Image (cartoon, coloured by chain):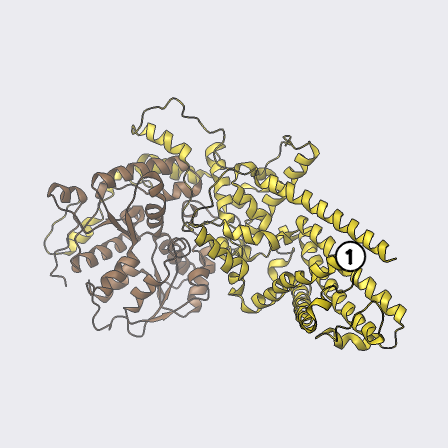
Chain colours: A yellow, B brown
């Protein structure tokens, strides 16, 4: 019986590792489809950003209560993983609470601490579930945000239920374990009552040893298999942010938010037109201006997409979205990921090579109306707790629309024309640009006007 | 104060007289052509004159920085404008620029370096703060604004884009008025709705215009003056006030205008 459990455990562990390895491979491969961009300068500054924003969750505390609850789940996730090490070792070696002996009295304190975290996770996840399902926090509601329809909404709730089940499993397992210790059951070394689960012990009063062992085993298996399923599931879900928040903040933009990236491929041409440079022989014309599909974006834009946990802080701060326009920065990120996942499946189905499917991010996922509604106000960028930049994607798609497809609203074309001919966005003569000065000089006594 | 003979020297004149200004005042298209914003330009120039700042403007040699073209996706037009501006600025060996437009400010400061134009660029809120701190602009009495309620509307291209939140507030504090904040301010400040090329097109279909959403918030503060620091915000806030038929009770002014008023310029 024991050996069978060990075999099943090792097989499950192997399968989970293989599945995760496959997923990580394809996620990495699709991120690398993006264009090159150097984000490795200033490592000390980057590390400090990562420590503050990802490790310390700085931006989550903009809303202190939610920040605190999220921190409870996060701390629980990170620290309870230490206990998983013990569970995995027990599973492989067929032992029970392998650390109990070596750690002595400290073991009980440690487990008590983990139980406290587990209780925190349980409470926080329950509150989150209530916020989503009963209080109906606006930014999660598909009735108001079309990108939340279907899977994204289910995904958000599913993960919370998952965590709640796992925490109940671990706490009740410990309680049953303590009850077995009290009975002097052979396989259960005495580790004492634990901080939280001792209060669950009355539930097991009067159970037979056999029933307790059965319950303890079932809870143990539910917990560890739950974690395995969770680990694979998260690579498909928005919960990938658990891992990607760290690299995503490390590689975030260090430039001022207002700065748009230059297009050097155009600079060359402009210099030639202005006579600043003569035609260089190898001046290659880029095959595409701006971004039409995911491969035209940078790898960081694509990592951003995988890092998005669909919390909607960006969208609820977006002036276009607030006033009922079609644009939702969260949808921009979700569309980018959906397209990227589609490309990933395409690559897997075609032996590692992407086969053109006549689809693109722009058009099949994101519509022009969304792009045109953006005021470039950077509110979405400011809000993101993991430093995702939806604006960068929006602007690259706009560049494609305007420069590659020559599709711009009529009034923008007028503006462009005015800029080209009058060097001002409005139809004024460049010669009149200094006329304002007469209003200044006239108001002084001595007319020293230099205006024509 | 009306004793002062206001002057608006151009770079060309300065160069001809072998003079170098402390700072170039970049006027911008709105400051040059928009009737409302020309008043801001005039107010700022009067302040510079009264503070004895040796400044110059480019006059007709100035062009749009290219910001609206770039944000709308037209990189080509942006770079054409940027390159020719850089040629002019470098020809006059310009080192330091001040501008009353956050869009010009952002473009000159952050985006011209990639095209070879490197200057020290200040927004007029920062420059005014420096003048006040250095004692070059003195506001005596504070009678003009005593008891007045002013709320400051953060411009996206000053605030989030460049992290300039405090300079405009410091300038307003010098007025000795009652400064009240909107609920969404500083990093959370709501856009006026005009950035990213929106100034030059109709808004996309929606429930409401962005400037109406913002003006409602501004009116909730009970302020009788809405202070702005951007020509686009000026247009959007003024339109919002008109929409709410509050032109009589609530005024929209740029920081420079408020300082000029306080100094009786």
Q: Nearer the viewer, residue B164 or A407?
A: B164
Which residue lies most toward the top here?
A281
Report the side of A369 relative to B193 (left or right). right
Across and down, in percent, residue A377 comes to 45, 52
Q: Is residue A23 above or below residue B236?
A: above
Name the residue: 67% across, 63% down. A80
Where does the N terminus of chain B fall, quadrant-wise?
A: bottom left
Report the side of A193 relative to A321 (left or right). right
Q: Which residue is mark 1?
A: A93
Across and down, in percent, residue B208 comes to 51, 55
The chain that hosts pointer 1 is A
Q: How many marks?
A: 1
Badge 1 marks a residue whose secondary structure is helix
Where does the C terminus of chain B fall, quadrant-wise?
A: bottom left
Residue A293 appears in the figure:
no
Q: Nearer the viewer, residue A70 or B129?
A: A70
Report the side of A62 relative to A426 (left or right). right
Q: Is residue A374 above or below residue B242?
A: above
Choose top left, top right, bottom left or bottom right for residue A91. bottom right
Across and down, in percent, residue A205 comes to 85, 77
Residue A448 appears in the figure:
yes
Q: Is residue A353 above or below residue B68?
A: above
């Amino acid at each position: 019986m024991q050996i069978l459990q060990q075999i099943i455990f090792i097989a499950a562990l192997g399968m989970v590792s293989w599945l995760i390895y496959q997923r990580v491979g394809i996620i990495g491969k699709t991120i690398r489809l993006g264009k090159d961009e150097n984000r490795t300068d200033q490592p000390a500054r980057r590390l400090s950003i990562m420590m503050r924003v990802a490790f310390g969750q700085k931006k989550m505390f903009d809303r202190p209560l939610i920040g605190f609850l999220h921190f409870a789940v996060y701390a629980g996730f990170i620290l309870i993983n230490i206990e998983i090490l013990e569970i995995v070792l027990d599973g492989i070696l067929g032992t029970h609470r392998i650390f109990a002996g070596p750690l002595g009295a400290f073991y009980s304190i440690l487990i008590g601490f983990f139980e406290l975290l587990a209780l925190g996770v349980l409470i926080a996840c329950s509150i989150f579930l209530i916020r989503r399902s009963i209080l109906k926090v606006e930014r999660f509601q598909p009735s108001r945000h079309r990108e939340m329809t279907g899977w994204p909404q289910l995904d958000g709730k599913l993960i919370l239920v998952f965590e709640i089940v796992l925490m109940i499993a671990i706490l009740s397992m410990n309680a049953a374990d303590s009850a077995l210790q009290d009975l002097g059951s052979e396989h259960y070394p005495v580790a004492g009552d634990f901080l939280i689960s001792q209060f669950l012990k009355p539930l097991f009063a009067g159970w037979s040893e056999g029933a307790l062992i059965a319950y303890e085993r079932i809870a143990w298996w539910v917990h560890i298999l739950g974690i395995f399923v969770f680990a694979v599931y998260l690579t498909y879900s928005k919960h990938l942010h658990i891992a990607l928040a760290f690299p995503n903040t490390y590689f975030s933009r260090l430039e001022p938010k207002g700065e748009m990236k230059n297009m050097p491929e155009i600079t060359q041409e402009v210099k030639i037109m202005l006579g600043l440079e003569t035609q260089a022989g190898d001046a290659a014309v880029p095959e595409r201006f701006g971004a039409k599909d995911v491969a035209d974006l940078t790898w960081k834009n694509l990592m951003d997409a995988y890092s998005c946990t669909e919390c909607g802080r960006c969208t609820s701060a977006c002036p276009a979205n607030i006033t009922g326009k079609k644009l939702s920065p969260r949808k921009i990120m979700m569309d980018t990921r959906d397209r990227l996942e589609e490309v990933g499946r395409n690559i897997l189905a075609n032996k590692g090579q992407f086969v053109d499917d006549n689809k693109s991010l722009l058009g099949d996922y994101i519509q022009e109306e969304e792009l045109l509604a953006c005021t470039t106000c950077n509110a979405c960028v400011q809000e993101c707790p993991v430093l995702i930049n939806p604006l960068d994607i929006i602007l690259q798609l706009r560049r494609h629309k305007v420069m590659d497809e020559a599709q711009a609203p009529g009034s923008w074309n007028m503006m462009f024309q005015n800029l080209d001919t009058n060097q001002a966005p409005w139809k004024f003569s460049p010669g009149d640009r200094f006329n304002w000065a007469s209003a200044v000089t006239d108001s002084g006594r001595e007319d020293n006007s230099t205006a024509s | 104060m009306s004793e002062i003979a206001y002057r608006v020297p151009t770079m060309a004149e300065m160069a001809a007289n072998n003079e170098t200004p402390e700072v170039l005042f970049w006027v911008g298209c709105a400051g040059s052509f928009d009737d409302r914003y020309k008043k801001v330009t005039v107010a700022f120039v009067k302040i510079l004159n009264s503070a004895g700042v040796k400044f110059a403007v480019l006059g007709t040699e100035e062009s749009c920085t290219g910001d609206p073209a770039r944000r709308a996706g037209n990189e080509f037009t942006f770079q054409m404008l940027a390159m020719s501006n850089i040629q002019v600025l470098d020809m006059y060996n310009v080192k330091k620029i001040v501008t009353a437009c956050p869009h010009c400010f952002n473009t000159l400061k952050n985006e011209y370096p990639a095209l070879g134009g490197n200057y020290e660029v200040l927004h007029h809120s920062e420059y005014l703060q420096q003048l006040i701190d250095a004692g070059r602009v003195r506001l005596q009495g504070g009678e003009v604004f005593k008891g007045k309620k002013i709320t400051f509307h953060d411009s996206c291209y000053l605030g989030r884009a460049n992290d300039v939140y405090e300079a405009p507030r410091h300038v307003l504090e010098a007025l000795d008025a009652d400064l009240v904040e909107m609920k969404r301010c500083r990093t959370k400040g709501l856009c006026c709705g005009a950035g990213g090329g929106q100034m030059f097109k109709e808004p996309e279909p929606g429930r409401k215009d962005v400037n109406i959403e913002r003006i409602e918030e501004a009116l909730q503060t009970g302020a009788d003056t809405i202070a702005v620091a951007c020509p686009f915000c000026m247009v959007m806030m003024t339109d919002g006030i008109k929409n709410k038929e509050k032109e009589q009770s609530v005024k929209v002014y740029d920081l420079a205008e408020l300082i000029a008023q306080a100094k009786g310029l």
